[in-house]
Amino acid sequence: MPLEEFTADVAVGYGSWVGMIKSIDSVLTLKFSDGSICELSDRDAVDLEDLTDKRDEDCEFKRYDYYPGQLLSGHFSIFEKGNFTSCSTELKNLKNSSKVALKAMVEKVHVASVTVNWQCQAYEAKPDLESTLAAINAAPPPSQIEGSDLEKLKMLNVFEPCTLQI
């Protein structure tokens, strides 16, 4: 089972349309040692330090994605950008303390949206000529796919990055 639902620079299909993934926006569910839970976007989480990765910042094998079980650390101001679904009084008291680094474990990584650059539309035969022409002249899907529409988005060439690296 892959760690990521979607991967950037991989072809995807959405109905009869084919495109390339430009970017993926995710939401991390973080759990603190006191039981507090925070949902934080991956864009806000870039300022957190990955305590499980001991490689140099300039290492070519360094991971920049997030996965369950990963331990992240940072100041409360970073976590405050997210949404606390539950926050203990102990954690609230640390709010004004700028020198204390908090640790949280990634419980879940949820894809919020995928931005796709649509390339072409495949021919889709319909029962009658009018429906076929309407399908051909249809506008591409929106460039940002989110919500229940993510289930309709299918990766077409999952192993392309592997073959390019080899």
Image: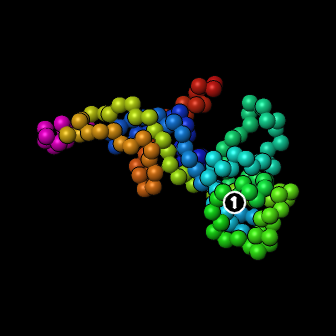
Q: Nearer the viewer, residue 36 or 108?
A: 36
For badge 1, the amino acid type reads: Glu
Question: Is residue 33 on the magenta stretch?
Answer: no
Q: Quadrant of residue 104?
A: bottom right
Residue at 79% of width from left, 35% of height from top? Answer: 57
Image check: 11 left or right of 91?
left
Q: Is residue 37 visible?
A: yes
Q: Secondary structure at mark 1?
A: loop
Q: Dot 1 corresponds to which residue? A: 80
Residue at 58% of width from left, 31% of height from top? Answer: 161
Colour logic: rainbow
Image check: 28 left or right of 134?
right
Q: Nearer the viewer, residue 61 or 28?
A: 28
Seen as rendered, the residue at the extreme bottom is 89
* Above/below status of 145 relative to 31: above
Q: Nearer the viewer, residue 158 or 62?
A: 62
- In percent of width and height, residue 152 lies at 40, 49
- In percent of width and height, residue 52 lies at 80, 48
Q: Is residue 34 visible?
A: no
Seen as rendered, the residue at the extreme front is 96
Seen as rendered, the residue at the extreme left is 129
- In percent of width and height, residue 74 lies at 78, 53
Q: Number of labelled discs?
A: 1
- In percent of width and height, residue 76 lies at 76, 59
Residue at 68% of width from left, 66% of height from top? Answer: 37
**First to last magenta residue range:** 124-133
